[in-house]
Image (spheres, rainbow, N blue to C red):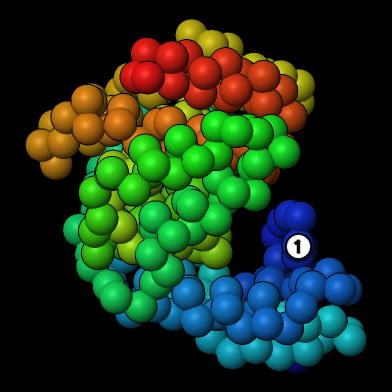
Amino acid sequence: MDKGTLIGKGMTAEVYEWGNRQALKLYYEGIPKDWITYEAEIGQVVHQAGVPAPAVYEQLEVDGRKGLLYERISGQSLSGSMLSDPERVMHNGEVFARLHANIHRSKTDKLPRQKDRLAQFIEQSAPFLGERVHLLLTVLEGLPDGEYICHGDLHPDNVLQADGQLTAIDWMDANRGDPLCDVARTSMIFLSPFLAMPPISISPAFSHQLNNAYLTEYCRITGASLTDIDRWRLPVAAARLRERVPYEQEWLLAYIDEQLNLSY
């Protein structure tokens, strides 16, 4: 079978239609086979756990490139919907929160431990953090463990809408742990100055409204408290430094120093 229409492209792969019901994620040259195998295994774990994620099928090679077949979700990203109808920002924040809460209802012992991953990422951020690393690892160790499925990078670009249903995609960072860590990361993404820069250029007012609607609805559904979510922001911010997101480094470091000064 030949690959169909190009659906999208990212940092590691292009995605094509494959037959009537599947999507082919075709990786760029140089992406290790182990990476693709890991993505397939993670995808199968989360789908089999019953979370709203696409099914994962076989690995294959097309045009000399390695690929992975997924269930095709034919729909618009939630970010596209948000930007096309900014008047519904509160509604979209609430819808997004309900999806995230739904994901967090499932448990597994087959994903990497959340705090292990965060510790690794904080250590990888050492060029930015310097001597702060050891203190941040101590803060992280004092936070709760858990066995709940967490996406690890849930934001509206990683959510597709089709037939009135929301499906979360891109599960490479999935882990098991405390859902409130997952919520804190999403909230930090919403508040990031990166969203206010070209080519995205979302206004800070829009981002704050979206973040407030998301957090309010998530807490209403789950009974979580903003205080418990906030406890995760410091290690989440430190771990995110390694990603070198444009315009974020100064903002994250200022936040980290402010929080450390308040606490110590």
Neighbours of disc 1 within 10 Å: few (<14), some (14-19), many (20+): few
Above or below, comparing residue 211 to residue 154 in the picture: above
The structure residue drawn at horizontal position 54% and vertical position 11%, both measured from the top left corner, is 204
Picture coordinates of residue 95, whole percent (x, y): 31, 38
Q: Quadrant of residue 59?
A: bottom right
Residue designated by label 1? 12
Above or below, comparing residue 132 to residue 85 in the picture: below
Picture coordinates of residue 173, whole percent (x, y): 51, 59
Number of numbered discs overlaid on the protein picture: 1
The structure residue drawn at horizontal position 24% and vertical position 49%, both measured from the top left corner, is 144
Above or below, comparing residue 12 to residue 69 in the picture: above
The structure residue drawn at horizontal position 23% and vertical position 26%, both measured from the top left corner, is 226
Can residue 172 be seen from the camera position used here? yes
Query: Relative to residue 33, is residue 84 drawn left or right?
Result: left
Seen from this angle, which residue lies furthest left? 223
Above or below, comparing residue 104 to residue 127 in the picture: below
Q: Nearer the viewer, residue 14 or 41?
A: 41
- Inspect the image, locate mark 1, and give the three-letter code of the amino acid beneath it: Thr
- Quadrant where the C terminus sits is top left
Picture coordinates of residue 25, whole percent (x, y): 69, 72
Picture coordinates of residue 46, whole percent (x, y): 38, 71
